Image (tube, rainbow, N blue to C red):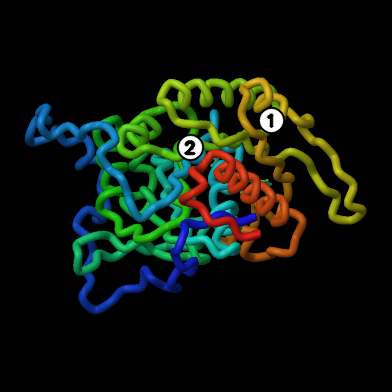
Amino acid sequence: MKLFRKDKKNSIPKNQGAAQPTMKTHPDLQVISGSQISRPATKPQTGATQPSPQNITLPGVEYKIAVASGKGGVGKSTVATNMAIALSQEGAKVGLMDADAYGPSIPTMMGINEQPQVGQDKKIIPLVSHGIKLMSIGFMVADGQAMIWRGPMLHKAIRDFLTEVNWGELDYLIIDLPPGTGDVALSLTQAIPLTGAVIVTTPQDVALADVRRGAAMFERLEVPILGVIENMSYFLCPHCGERTDIFRSDGGKNTSEKLGVSFLGQIPIDAEICTAGDLGVPIVASNSDSPQSAAFRDVANQLVEELRNRGPEDELKIIS
Ligand code: ADP
């Protein structure tokens, strides 16, 4: 079941990010060095320059969905990229905003190694890869530099991503948050009203404790939790197809039940998922007929179903 905005066409123009003669590199996209970051601000921030909470609306974007995790390395970015592509393959217009300042991996996973251009309207044109419009903190900083960003810089970067980027019309804007409960989630929820957040976890107890912390943060920020996704849930033998629960089974499902939120599904642990991400062509794009890709599609469909159950009916068109 697919869910799109009413009366909008569902195709993303290919190569929308390609350079055009009138474009030049946006000054904000120049690589920022560590010394610039540590330099004291020339003007102290006054109350007047402080952003007021939630004053960005992004009227062209229907669903703004944060992808979060309690800890790093659970596959949050892998899930975000493959889910975005799965939605796009169903005909939805999808943007992917990589707000993981502490480890922006979306450019690598989506096979992008360039900086976006600025259009005549002075807005940054997202790059397009595998049908997805992309922006990443990784496009704006030298390797590793965003690691030392703190509150105000992150806050500005997040707002710029929302206001200075020409996202255009989108059915879904998927936002890859840094792991844990930190400044970026706070800045984002202050900047725009999110449709909700999904939390990615692995099945072990140590990861699940972090899910509960993440869920508590979203509750405090009044962001609806759309569901929990369990990654690296099981291993499918490539020879006999037998399923092995390497860590333990159903931890994500049990935790989502305890939290009273939806369980959106399980993704297997698989060498091809890892390799495909490293090569810049996520598995849903590189091997869409595989059972691994089917698992990502199931999760995307569950998310759509969740949105359908929550969303105002008069704004939705359901294509079965
Ligand atoms: P996070 O965003 O949570 O830090 P990533 O998506 O960057 O995690 O994934 C961390 C590593 O684990 C990457 O090398 C990725 O390819 C790998 N990975 C993620 N999910 C899977 C999976 N289901 N099977 C195999 N490898 C995976």
The answer as to whether callout 2 falls within 8 Å of ligand 1 is no
Residue at image position (35%, 36%) is: 188
User: What's the mark number on residue 118?
Assistant: none
Q: Position of residue 253 (x, y in %)?
A: 71, 30
Q: Which residue corresponds to mark 2?
A: 196
Q: Which residue corresponds to mark 1?
A: 252
Observer-nearest of 166 and 269? 166
Quadrant of the drawing holding the N terminus:
bottom right
Q: Ligand 1 is found in which quarter of the picture?
A: top right
Residue 278 visible, this angle: no
Residue at image position (65%, 45%) is: 302
Residue at image position (38%, 71%) is: 16
* Mark 1 neighbour density, 10 Å: few (under 14) some (14–19) many (20 or more): many
Counting residues from the N terminus, which is met first, the one under dot 2 or under dot 1?
A: 2
SS class of the residue under badge 1? helix
Residue at image position (53%, 56%) is: 317
Q: Viewed as shown, does residue 262 lie left or right of 11?
A: right
Res 156 quadrant in image: top left
Observer-nearest of 115 and 60? 60
- Mark-to-mark CA distance, 2 and 1: 18 Å
